[in-house]
Amino acid sequence: EGDEAEVLQLYANGYEEAAVDAALQWYQQAAVKELGGLVEAYRRPTRRIPDRRQDGLPARSVYARPPLAVGVHEAPGPVAARAVLRRLIAALGPVHPTSVRART
């Protein structure tokens, strides 16, 4: 996906703030397009959703088994954009100024 590749390329090249800006813009655009799914995601109980398209959960995890298992393709809302933004903030760390700015 072009948006994901752009964000990852910016981050890999050391442009952390630009990567966060691109990720936020992608998420905002995706959220507008998938508003119904976004609302549904917030209405559902909290469940761990893997951040990657491949299985990102250990097989022994309670979230890897029905009825709690939810794959990226099954989750509502702007899943790909949300996952990239979440991974980017995790990589920067919660107290990094850019992460703080992105969360506020």
Image (tube, grey):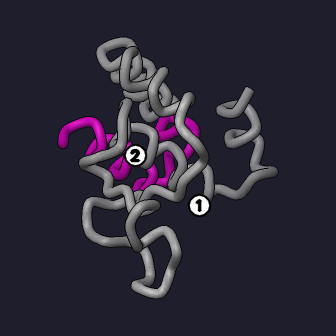
Viewer-nearest of labels 1 and 2? 1
**Element at label 1:** helix
Name the spot of residue 33 as percent of width and height, x first: 30, 15
Say which quarter of the image contains residue 82: top left
Give residue 55's position: percent from left, percent from top: 31, 71
Question: Is 57 located above or below residue 81 in the figure?
Answer: below
Residue 6 magenta-highlighted: yes
49 relative to 62, above or below: above
**Residue 86 screen position, x and y as percent:** 54, 48
Query: Left or right: 51 with respect to 102?
Result: left
Residue positioned 75% across, 49% down in the render: 96
Q: Quadrant of residue 37?
A: top left
Q: Which portion, as a residue range, is magenta?
A: 1-20
Q: Quadrant of the N terminus?
A: top left
In the picture of the structure, the residue carrying the numbered disc 1 is 91
Query: For residue 46, which numbered disc appears in the image?
Result: none
Instruction: State how far apart marks 1 and 2 are (Cα).
Output: 13 Å
Residue type beneath disc 1: Ala
Q: Name which quarter of the figure residue 27 lies in.
A: top left
Q: What is the number of the mark on residue 10?
A: 2
For image coordinates 41% across by 61% down, the residue present is 67
- Asked if labels 2 and 1 touch by Cβ distance under 8 angstroms, the answer is no
Camera-nearest residue between 80 and 67 = 67
For the image, the number of numbered tags is 2
Quarter of the figure that contains the C terminus: top right
Instruction: State the residue lying farthest toward the bottom.
Output: 60
Q: Residue at the far front: name it.
A: 67
Q: Is residue 63 magenta?
A: no
Q: Main secondary structure of the magenta part?
A: helix
Q: Residues within 10 Å of mark 2 (few under 14, many from 20)?
A: some
The three-letter code of the residue at mark 2 reads Leu
